[in-house]
Image (tube, rainbow, N blue to C red):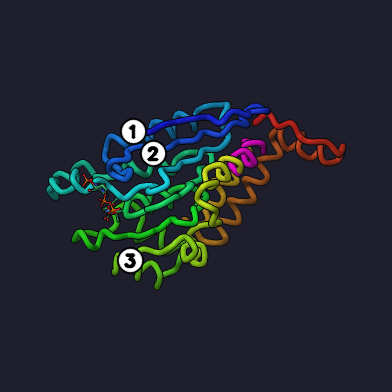
């Protein structure tokens, strides 16, 4: 249900990009258990792959993902979903150390929008639509739609989306701060992969610590966050990549990072 492809150009160690394409076209990439298991498996495999420096997740032109699978959910009862802590395993996506770019074309609804928000950079195709329509099904978002969305777009817009179920366009998502760029749909994936290569050619140590530090900002107070950032900054002076990066600058050459 998931297709993986490494666009080849890993010139340096760890310089590759792992592209994951959700592929369940008949259900607009609705995230059934099997699809999500495949996705997590693919993400983890790239996270542990020394040749890969950045991961891109995308869907089809019509849908990034139209949400969790409604036919699977419709049969569930409280005791069952509570005991198995339904959807808690989705958070594994956020435990990766390498950056993940979501390249969102078409619908990113419900769990699809939440999956995109678990990624580190969101790029939207010009026809993308984002929404949390769970309210129309008699439920609420269950994987970050009431939590990550408010941090991205603020309370009023998050409330509006969660309470009305209305979708917002790529441009609105951009204006609200949910996505960092709107890109022509046809070239979205190529551009996302290009951005992936830009990231993958940096020091893998610095990239990982940068991701960790930025994500800590959502969890802790400013003073704790600043302390954590400074400690990470200090720690990078123990890496070969810091020596290489600074020497290369002074010697006016391109750095050759080894991710050590
Ligand atoms: C299961 C889905 C689905 C979904 C679409 N399909 N979304 N199946 N779960 N979430 C299926 C349809 O049943 C249909 O199957 C096929 O995909 C094509 O969909 P259509 O509705 O015919 O397409 P279209 O008219 O273009 O409308 C597209 C759409 C609509 C606006 C995206 O499909 C839609 O509203 N989907 C549901 C969106 C949603 O409510 N998402 C939130 C789910 S709850 P057939 O067999 O009829 O061709 C959720 C909870 C998350 O995500 C909780 C935490 C993870």
Q: Is the residue 46 above or below the residue 163 in the image?
A: above
> Spatial distance from mark 3 to mark 1, Cα to Cα?
28 Å
Front residue of this view, candidates 76 and 174: 174
Rendered residue at 33%/33% (across/down) = 1
Q: Are marks 3 and 1 in contact (CB under 8 Å)?
A: no
Rendered residue at 47%/62% (across/down) = 173
Q: Secondary structure at mark 1?
A: loop
Q: Is mark 2 within 8 Å of ligand 1?
A: no
Q: Are marks 2 and 1 in contact (CB under 8 Å)?
A: yes
Q: Is the residue 86 above or below the residue 175 in the image?
A: above
Q: Is residue 247 left or right of residue 5?
A: right
Give me the disc on residue 22.
2
Give coordinates of residue 53: x percent, y percent: 58, 34
Mark positioned earlier in the residue sequence (3 or 2): 2
Q: Is the residue 154 above or below the residue 111 in the image?
A: below
Q: Is residue 51 left or right of residue 79?
A: right
> Spatial distance from mark 2 to mark 1, Cα to Cα?
6 Å
Front residue of this view, candidates 211 and 43: 43
Segment tinted magenta in the rendering: 195-204
Residue position for label 3: 166
> Spatial distance from mark 3 to mark 2, Cα to Cα?
24 Å
Front residue of this view, candidates 180 and 124: 124
Residue 197 on the magenta span: yes
Mark positioned earlier in the residue sequence (2 or 1): 1
Give coordinates of residue 8: x percent, y percent: 59, 28
Q: Is the residue 84 above or below the residue 157 in the image?
A: above
Give me the disc on residue 1.
1
List the single residue furthest toward the front.
Answer: 186
Task: State the quadrant of the C terminus.
Answer: top right
């Amino acid at each position: 249900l998931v297709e993986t492809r490494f666009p080849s150009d890993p010139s340096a160690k760890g310089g590759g990009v792992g592209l994951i394409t959700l592929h369940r076209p008949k259900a607009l990439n609705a995230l059934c258990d099997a699809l999500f298991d495949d996705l997590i498996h693919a993400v983890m495999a790239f996270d542990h792959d020394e040749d890969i420096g950045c991961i891109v997740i995308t869907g089809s032109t019509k849908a990034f993902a139209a949400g969790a699978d409604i036919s699977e959910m419709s049969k569930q009862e409280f005791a069952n979903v509570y005991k198995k802590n339904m959807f808690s395993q989705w958070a594994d996506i956020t435990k990766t150390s390498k950056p993940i770019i979501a390249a969102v074309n078409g619908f990113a609804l419900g769990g699809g929008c939440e999956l995109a928000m678990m990624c580190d950079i969101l790029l939207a195709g010009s026809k993308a639509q984002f929404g949390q329509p769970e309210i129309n099904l008699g439920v609420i978002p269950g994987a970050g739609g009431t939590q990550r969305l408010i941090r991205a777009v603020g309370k009023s817009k998050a409330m509006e989306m969660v309470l009305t179920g209305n979708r917002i366009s790529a441009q609105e998502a951009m204006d609200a701060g949910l996505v960092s760029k709107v890109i022509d749909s046809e070239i979205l994936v190529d551009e996302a992969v290009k951005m992936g290569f830009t990231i993958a050619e940096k020091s893998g140590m610095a990239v990982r610590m940068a991701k960790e530090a930025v994500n800590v900002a959502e969890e802790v107070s400013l003073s704790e966050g600043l302390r954590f950032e400074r400690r990470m900054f200090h720690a990078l002076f123990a890496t070969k990549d810091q020596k290489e990066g600074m020497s290369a600058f002074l010697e006016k050459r391109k750095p050759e990072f080894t991710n050590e």
